[in-house]
Amino acid sequence: MELKAGNLNDVREFLVHDLHKFDLVSAGHGWSLYKTLLHCAQTIEFSMSGYPKLKPLIIRRTVGRIVLKKFLKNNKMKHDLTAPVPGAAEIADEGNISEAVAVSVKTIDDFMSYSGQYKEHLLFGKLSKKEYDEYFTLHYADHFSDYQNMK
């Protein structure tokens, strides 16, 4: 399915008001919806608390920045939909979707109200709040592209 969102607030609104209207089934390229929602929330949390493992500085300052700029310019990203965050706690494959939505919404809210300095992204390096917002929106959209609505 195509998640049409211009920013994390749009993603939040979709999760709160629209997600329940769909019967989403993975096309087989990614995780369960539960795991996807918690993974996306986990990446947002790491922008505030710090990613467990970072790519080498030279990668974050060169290739990582190039990739990020391409994603943001094209307003689209493609990545391995089953790649966990290196060093992060493993997320269960299945669980309560309502709880996963609540975690995602809370993490988005925490991000939006966060006034501290954002931590470096594991691949893209230092990002502004605006860049993180755009990246996280694309991240959700890429993961949701794997789902088909069965209603």
Image: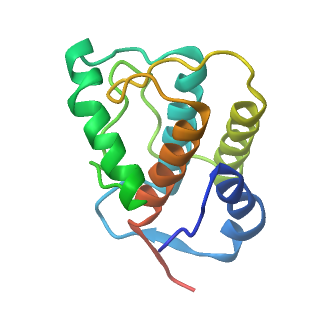
Q: How many labels were placed on the picture?
A: 0
- x then y, percent, for residue 66: 26, 39
Residue nearest the observer in this picture, 11 or 18: 11
Vertical comparison of 143 with 19: above or below: above
- x then y, percent, for residue 6: 60, 60
Q: Quadrant of residue 124?
A: top left
What residue lies at 48% left-to-right and 44% top-to-bottom? 135
In this image, 24 relative to 113: left or right? left
Q: Quadrant of residue 54?
A: top left
Q: How is the image coloured?
A: rainbow
Q: Quadrant of the C terminus?
A: bottom right
Look at the image and tell me whether residue 31 can be seen: no
Look at the image and tell me whether residue 100 can be seen: yes
In this image, 50 relative to 129: left or right? left
What residue lies at 45% left-to-right and 55% top-to-bottom? 32
In this image, 150 relative to 68: left or right? right
- x then y, percent, for residue 19: 66, 67
Residue nearest the observer in this picture, 121 or 79: 121
What residue lies at 60% left-to-right and 33% top-to-bottom? 129
In this image, 140 relative to 71: left or right? right
- x then y, percent, for residue 51: 45, 18
Vertical comparison of 73 with 47: above or below: below
Vertical comparison of 57 with 132: above or below: above
What residue lies at 31% left-to-right and 50% top-to-bottom? 70
